[in-house]
Amino acid sequence: MKPSLFKLEGCGNDFLLSQESLEATQIRKLCDRHFGVGADGLVVLTQKNGVWKWQFFNQDGSEARFCGNAARCVALWLSAVKGEKNPRWSDRWGHAFEGREVEGQQWQVHWGLEDHWDLEDIAPAYRKSLEHLGHDFEQVVWVQAGVPHVVLMSHQELPSFEQRQAIVALFRPHGPEGSNVTFASRKSFQAVSFERGVEAETLACGSGAAAASLAYFEIHRRWPEWSFPGGPLRIVEDLGRMWLQGPARIVFEAKIP
């Protein structure tokens, strides 16, 4: 019997989910939007001794430690397909995940963000370069939110797509493993992320929403809701635990050829 392949999306950030291990070449082919199914990434979810474990792979077949929207989609899938009332799973590094539905098609995921987040002001090192590119940001910070993001917070509207592309070229290499780049406006609360592994802007980014929220919280001490091109995402704090919340749905089920 050919294995099933599910397609899911969270705020337009779309993923494939397989219960079978796949090679990087297969992942790239399946995620290709012209010659495959098309997705921003792929989840491999397996169960052993009653314990669910996941691996997340970028569109280019590389493995990533975390993806917030993919994690919310896993919570939905475990609940809707496997009947898990309190979806829980872990990764191969031993990190624990927990998901829950809070209202119609709104799913939250908790991954211990409050225990591991790191934030560093990197504006001084890039100030002259940003002045040359012609956009003023009130915060330029590197944030570890499961995966690394450079967050550029503006008190104005978001820079144009052409400006963002030039700025991404500057910040994508930042850090030992490179970084995702997230732009956020505290005027309109719009946000957009350029994701490594996809090497393009996606319709939404869960870790980007978390990173932008952490940067915003450092100054304003509250959690905003960000409007990504694909929909809203926000951090919800519940008894000292941080949950990423937004819509998610199963698109379809197919068979891997």
Image (spheres, rainbow, N blue to C red):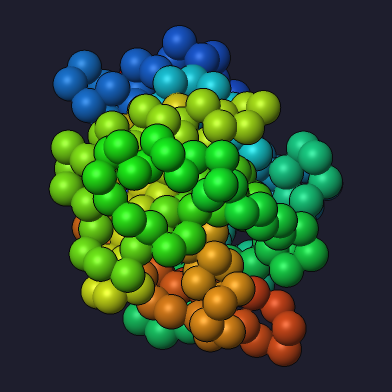
In the displayed structure image, the side of residue 222 where residue 185 appears, left or right: left
The residue furthest bottom is 239
Answer yes or no: is residue 133 visible. yes
In this orientation, which residue lies closer to the viewer: 250 or 40?
A: 40
Q: Residue at x 35, y 23 (%)?
A: 30
State whether residue 37 is above or below residue 131.
above
Image quadrant where one finds the C terminus: top left
State whether residue 127 is above or below residue 214.
above
Could you tell me residue 182's position as x and y percent? 41, 50
State whether residue 192 is above or below residue 238.
above
Could you tell me residue 220's position as x and y percent? 52, 82
Q: Residue at x 25, y 45 (%)?
A: 134
Answer yes or no: is residue 40 visible. no
The mark total stands at 0
In the displayed structure image, the side of residue 26 where residue 211 appears, left or right: right
- The image quadrant of residue 165 is top left
Q: Residue at x 28, y 75 (%)?
A: 187
State whether residue 128 is above or below residue 52.
above
Could you tell me residue 221's position as x and y percent? 58, 84
In this orientation, which residue lies closer to the viewer: 102 or 222?
A: 222
Could you tell me residue 10's position as x and y percent? 36, 57
Q: Residue at x 22, y 64 (%)?
A: 157
